[in-house]
Image (spheres, rainbow, N blue to C red):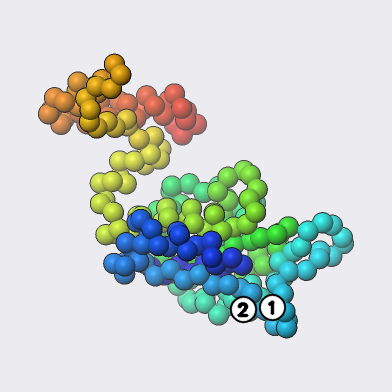
Amino acid sequence: MRIDILTLFPGLFQGFLNESIIKRAIEKKLVDIHIINFREFSRLNNSQVDDTPYGGGSGMVLMVEPIVTAIESLKKDNSKVILLCPQGNSYKQKKAYELKENSHLILVCGHYEGFDERIRSFVDEEISIGDYVLTGGEIPAMVVCDSVVRLIDGVIKKDSYLEESFTNNLLDYPTYTKPREFRGMKVPEILLSGDHKKIDEWRKQEQLKKTTEKRKDLLE
């Protein structure tokens, strides 16, 4: 998979690309991630990519031409272009699985007061990671990138994500490790029994219990 991220602030991605699972996935050549500064696609002498909004108002608006030019320079027949913005569809684990099936993603990070409305005509989908406003789309782009890359075959063990939260609309079951007792809190005896069938049944019950208590909306 190839992922191109269009941003005004490439430096924000340095740590993201050079640590943990993302770094290992890149080193194993399971994913190819490129950070593109769309300021490079400005035709103005000062590389300007934003301007004041027509009709007045505060803040600066990202211009349509440099972003569309950047998209078109990268886009292939198999590309999926995603705009990260507050008005997009709420991001869910199901969408991460869908995006994993694409061979090329182009993620566009908005910034400043917003972006020229005409940019929407050149993207395939708009995604929001929550009902709040961030300074820009860089953090949402990292969220989408991380959630998708970890699902690529060979990045992590398949069992690790098949049983985690939001799989089958359930939260993850509780997990424990050593010591067996800490300040009076003990590891459930069932996990020490060695009876894997009963352990699996207990975990499924705990998933349902936790989801009912904390995220009943997932069961609807």
Q: Position of residue 210 (x, y in %)?
A: 39, 27
For the point 44% across and 31% down, the residue is 219
Determine whether the residue tagged by mark 2 lies in a helix, strand or loop. helix
Determine whether the residue tagged by mark 1 lies in a helix, strand or loop. loop
Res. 40 mark: 2
For the point 53% across and 61% down, the residue is 12
Quadrant location, the N terminus: bottom left
For the point 55% across and 48% down, the residue is 129
Q: Position of residue 128 (x, y in %)?
A: 58, 51
Question: How far apart in space, not on screen, are marks 1 and 2 (Cα)?
Answer: 7 Å
Based on the displayed image, in which of its 4 quarters is residue 72 positioned?
bottom right
Q: Which residue is mark 1?
A: 47
Based on the displayed image, in which of its 4 quarters is residue 21 positioned?
bottom left
Q: Is residue 9 above or below residue 147?
A: below
Q: Position of residue 172 (x, y in %)?
A: 35, 35
For the point 46% across and 52% down, the residue is 95
Q: Is residue 187 above or below residue 21?
A: above
Q: Is residue 65 left or right of residue 15?
A: right
Q: Residues within 10 Å of mark 2 (few under 14, many from 20)?
A: some
Q: Residues within 10 Å of mark 1 (few under 14, many from 20)?
A: few
Tell me if I can see residue 124 in this picture.
no
Tell me if I can see residue 212 in this picture.
yes
Q: Position of residue 184 (x, y in %)?
A: 29, 16
Three-letter amino acid code at the position of disc 1: Ser
* Residue farthest to the top, as pictured: 184
* Residue farthest to the left, as pictured: 194
